[in-house]
Image: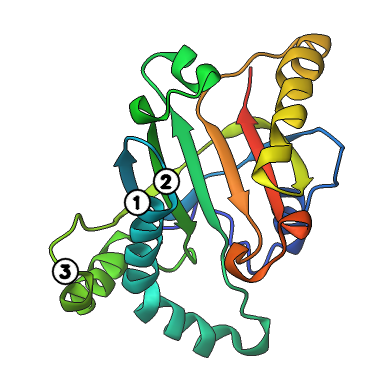
Amino acid sequence: MPYQNMIDLSQDMATLKTLYAPLQHHFRVVDVPTLPFAILDGKGAPDPASVGVAIQALSTALEPIRREARQRMGRTFMEAPVEILYWSDNPHDLAMGTRDRWQWRVQITLPVWADAACFEQAVAQMRAALGDGPAPRWEAVTEGKCVQVMHVGSQAELSALLHQFYTEYLPKEGLEPLGVYHEIYLDDWSKMASSRRKMIVRQPVR
């Protein structure tokens, strides 16, 4: 089976809760297994317009898979959250907020049965709706050892949490970043007050 080494999060509720329902204000080390994703990359400032286009493209490409997932899972179907990774060739660009030099990746987890061939068929079905932009791709991603925490509040309030995370928690625990900074958005922010928005902050470490 093409997904024999992947965990089916729809069946492993303990792992699903560990990865996608962390406690607020509680940093936790987790082991993120290999998971299949639909991915679209971007460059430059991750403003709402450019990120929104990428999210819309992913959502459109995923629609045939969503329909099948709803049929397979029925009432247990859950919409996978949007996840965005941010990085730069020069780490100081992230720290200094030089957003025009950033690179970013929008991704959404896929069911384990939706392999690369299945995803390519879904993209082909939705090609007319996707237009001429870059096509999303399928990729199996392994983040491994990470530290994550739940943040509830606006994006502007996130800086204090990140300062605590990188300057206090990681050094105290003898850990250092290894890999790309990762945010997981658990709400539709267009429908949620900023004070109630939930986001998981995840950082691969060593």
- Measured in 3D between alpha carbons, the distance from the residue under mark 3 to the one under mark 1, in whole angstroms, is 15 Å
- Measured in 3D between alpha carbons, the distance from the residue under mark 1 to the one under mark 2, in whole angstroms, is 6 Å
Q: Which is more toward the observer, 19 or 81?
A: 81
Is 116 situated above or below 128?
above
Provide the secondary structure element on which disc 1 rests: helix
Q: Residue at x 79, y 48 (%)?
A: 22
**Res. 8 image quadrant:** bottom right
**Residue 77 rendering spot, x and y as whole percentages:** 61, 80
Number of marks present in the image shown: 3
Q: Quadrant of the C terminus?
A: top right
Q: Which residue is mark 2?
A: 47
Q: Quadrant of the N terminus?
A: bottom left
Answer yes or no: do the residues labelled 3 and 1 have beta carbons within 8 Å? Answer: no
- Mark 2 residue type: Asp
Q: Which residue is mark 1?
A: 50
Left or right of 155, for residue 124? left
Q: Which residue is mark 3?
A: 131
Answer yes or no: do the residues labelled 1 and 2 have beta carbons within 8 Å? Answer: yes
- Mark 1 residue type: Ser
Left or right of 197, for residue 172? right
Q: Residue at x 57, y 61 (%)?
A: 81
Left or right of 65, for residue 149? right
- Mark 3 residue type: Gly
